Amino acid sequence: MTSALRERFWERYTLEELTSAEWEALCDGCGQCCLLKLHDEETQELAVLNVACRLLDTHTCQCSDYENRFAYVPDCTQLTPALVREFTWLPATCGYRRVAEGRKLAGWHPLLSNDAECVHRKGVSVRGYAVSQDDVPEQQLESHIIAVLPM
Ligand code: SF4
Ligand code: SF4
């Protein structure tokens, strides 16, 4: 852990109180929020696909151009404390969601394990099942639904 991060900051501060370095470090690198979703206005349900945003490296589960991502993916969302609470679709494993809900981070989180591969070995990340949207024709998206969530 670098000195820019306060000791066990995730247990001692709210999301609003984090520095930008702490905010970034709280992401566990699972890539789940970069999976495409289909919103059904009628049923108010959100279908999650195993199809990832074209900028997601489906092996590392990292954004391949995080700094410039909004230039390529204008609808990529910058998470904020308010959005973490609003986005009920964020996975229960998500580091931001855990802190927002007053839960502990899991032992596999990079902040605790000091091992960025742990999230993959534990099967929490999208590695191994996510495919890039560049490889899926738009008319086939619906056949890639892996979960349907209430909004
Ligand atoms: S779901 Fe949460 S922890 Fe996982 S990549 Fe997205 S922001 Fe990071
Ligand atoms: S632009 Fe990057 S951070 Fe945003 S959804 Fe795509 S892969 Fe994820």
Image (cartoon, helix red, strand yellow):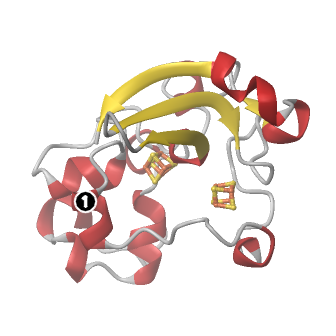
The type of residue carrying mark 1 is Glu
- Residue located at (34% from left, 49% from top): 95
- Residue located at (40% from left, 24% from top): 148
Q: Quadrant of residue 84?
A: bottom left
The C terminus lies in which quarter of the figure?
top left
Mark 1: secondary structure: helix
Q: What residue sits right under mark 1 in the picture?
A: 86
Camera-side residue: 43 or 48?
43
Numbered label tally: 1
Q: Residues within 10 Å of mark 1 (few under 14, many from 20)?
A: few
- Residue located at (46% from left, 77% from top): 21
Q: Is residue 13 visible?
A: yes
Using the image, determine if residue 113 lies above or below residue 75: above
- Residue located at (31% from left, 54% from top): 87
Q: Is residue 1 visible?
A: no
Percent across and percent down for residue 121 are 57, 20
Percent across and percent down for residue 141 are 71, 28
Using the image, determine if residue 75 lies above or below residue 139: below
Ligand 1 has an atom within 8 Å of the beta carbon of the residue at disc 1: no
Percent across and percent down for residue 102 are 10, 51
Camera-side residue: 22 or 126?
126
